[in-house]
């Protein structure tokens, strides 16, 4: 889960335009906001034969690695920004997208740039723009095709791209859902949830960093919190009708880590900090662990006793599932939300060292696969999945495709290393993957964002069924 990092009410006071950027300097810092004369370049997806600058290399013809051998992380100097290279072990095409020295606006004191989180979609609707986060709470837009920075944008928390309009970005400001139009810098209020909770002193209505709307952007699963950051109510909002269609008041003493709606909008999930006793499952009156409700916040059921990192996605049959680290069994497992059935997918070997896991189920256009990223600190590789990014097929004994070493050292005793967790996230068709790396500099906050480019329909070239 994400650290609660309070940057609420932030308004960016600087930015850039890509015409002012060289390899090492930023010469002017115009604000990209409602009064700015800056306009983004037209958002046009390149044709099939277009050269995508910075992400072409020979791995388009290379076989993807599907073995489960232990491959040590090779020694390699930190790559230059926006210069492609091939992973020396897995042959995938990778490029360091951000440059923490040159890309930050002068008034941004951040030491690093990253994709926000594994569960969240950093690419807009047509992959032409990428949202990038600086670790002090600022937001930047990068060109999705040549990977250059465009400008800093003045938004608050929880930015979420619209699923159809590549120019539209939603975000949260206290109890309001906002819309930001990239091409003009204009900001509008979409809905004020304070009006839906009369008599309550509401500080925030949000997912608490980790949730997303349904894959069509219509349904939003949200949580209202009071001025003491205690949960007040669960809400389901219908963007199409601009209405809160369900509301459930909750026990303010029951901390909830985060909430989300499922990809098709059929289920509301509340991830509780309190785990359930082994022999006493939670229920609507005493929730714990993972609570799953229907779209109207009825029929709540405790489907996982204690919930670790996870993400929602679709299986090969189009059913809504949650892929998660199963703490009770030490497996990567899959929960079918409709039936409540849990399927064990891959065992996790903790006998050598601790392992941290993050999952990304954003690739709803390629159902049946999830992206997994791991970190295990500064120890030598002891299992095949140490410090890895890999694709996992969502069925028992499913295929595993090894994509990259993260080159990120995450030492749990170093608080700064939270930012170095890879948090790998995938685009909607599973061809572009973003991840964060400190490239071995643990304890420094010096991180950058990397991109892995995969061929279209890469699963057709896998040899093992």
Image (cartoon, rainbow, N blue to C red):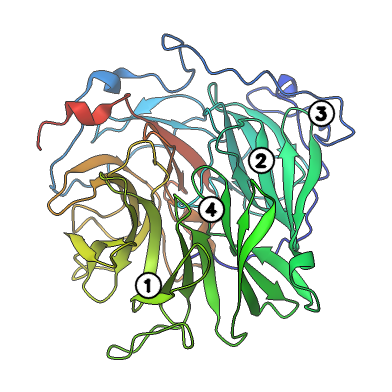
Across and down, in percent, residue 88 comes to: 27, 32
Please name the residue that numbered disc 4 is placed on: 212
Q: Which class describes the residues within 10 Å of circle 3: few (<14), some (14-19), or many (20+)? A: some
Question: Which residue is label 1 attached to?
Answer: 307
Query: Callout 2 environment at 10 Å: few (<14), some (14 to 19), or many (20+)?
Result: many
Query: Distance from label 1 to label 3 (Cα)?
Result: 47 Å
Q: Nearer the viewer, mark 3 or mark 4?
A: 4
| Image position of 31 with respect to 158: above or below | above
The residue lying at 16 percent from left, 44 percent from top is: 399
Element marked by disc 1: strand
Q: CA distance from mark 4 to mark 1?
A: 18 Å
Q: CA distance from mark 1 to mark 2?
A: 30 Å
* Left or right: 30 as drawn, with respect to 134: right
Q: Quadrant of residue 105?
A: top right
Which residue is disc 2 drawn over? 169
Per the image, the residue denoted by label 3 is 28
Circle 4 or circle 1, nearest the eye: 4
Comes first in the chain, label 2 or label 4: 2
Q: Nearer the viewer, mark 3 or mark 2?
A: 2
């Amino acid at each position: 889960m994400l650290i609660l990092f309070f940057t609420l009410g932030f308004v960016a006071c600087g930015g850039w335009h890509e015409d002012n950027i060289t390899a090492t300097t930023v010469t002017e810092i115009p604000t990209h906001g409602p009064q700015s004369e800056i306009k983004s370049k037209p958002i046009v997806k390149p044709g099939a034969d277009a050269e995508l600058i910075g992400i072409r290399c020979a791995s388009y013809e290379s076989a993807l690695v599907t073995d489960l051998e232990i491959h040590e992380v090779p020694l390699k100097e930190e790559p230059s920004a926006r210069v492609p290279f091939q992973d020396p072990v897995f042959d995938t095409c990778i490029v360091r997208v951000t440059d923490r020295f040159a890309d930050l606006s002068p008034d941004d004191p951040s030491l690093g740039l990253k994709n926000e989180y594994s569960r969240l979609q950093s690419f807009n609707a047509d992959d032409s723009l990428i949202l990038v986060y600086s670790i002090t709470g600022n937001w930047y837009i990068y060109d999705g095709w040549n990977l250059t920075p465009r400008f800093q944008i003045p938004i608050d928390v929880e930015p979420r791209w619209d699923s159809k309009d590549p120019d539209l970005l939603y975000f949260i400001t206290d109890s309001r859902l906002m819309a930001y139009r990239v091409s003009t810098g204009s900001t509008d209020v979409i809905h004020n949830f304070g009006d839906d909770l009369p008599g309550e002193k509401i500080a925030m209505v949000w997912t608490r960093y980790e949730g997303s709307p349904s894959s069509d952007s219509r349904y939003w699963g949200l949580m209202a919190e009071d001025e003491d950051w205690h949960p007040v109510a669960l809400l389901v909002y219908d963007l199409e009708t601009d209405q809160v269609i369900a509301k459930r008041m909750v026990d303010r003493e029951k901390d909830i880590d985060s909430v989300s709606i499922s990809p098709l909008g059929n289920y509301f999930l509340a991830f509780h900090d309190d785990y359930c006793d082994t022999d006493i499952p939670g229920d609507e009156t005493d929730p714990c662990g993972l609570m799953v409700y229907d779209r109207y916040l009825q029929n709540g059921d405790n489907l996982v006793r204690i919930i670790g990192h996870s993400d929602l996605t679709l299986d090969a049959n189009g059913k809504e599932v949650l892929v998660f680290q199963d703490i009770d069994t030490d497996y990567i497992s899959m929960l079918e939300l409709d039936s409540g059935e849990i399927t064990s997918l891959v065992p996790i070997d903790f006998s050598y060292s601790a392992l941290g896991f993050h999952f990304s189920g954003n690739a709803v256009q390629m159902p049946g696969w999830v992206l997994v990223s791991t970190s295990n600190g500064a120890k030598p590789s002891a299992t095949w999945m140490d410090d890895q990014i890999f694709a996992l097929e969502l069925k028992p004994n499913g295929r595993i495709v090894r994509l990259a070493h993260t080159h990120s050292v995450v030492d749990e005793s170093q608080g700064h290393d939270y930012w170095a967790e890879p948090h790998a996230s995938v685009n909607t068709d599973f061809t572009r993957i973003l991840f964060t790396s400190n490239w071995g500099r643990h304890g420094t906050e010096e991180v950058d964002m990397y991109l892995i480019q995969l061929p279209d329909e890469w699963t057709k070239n896998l040899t093992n069924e």
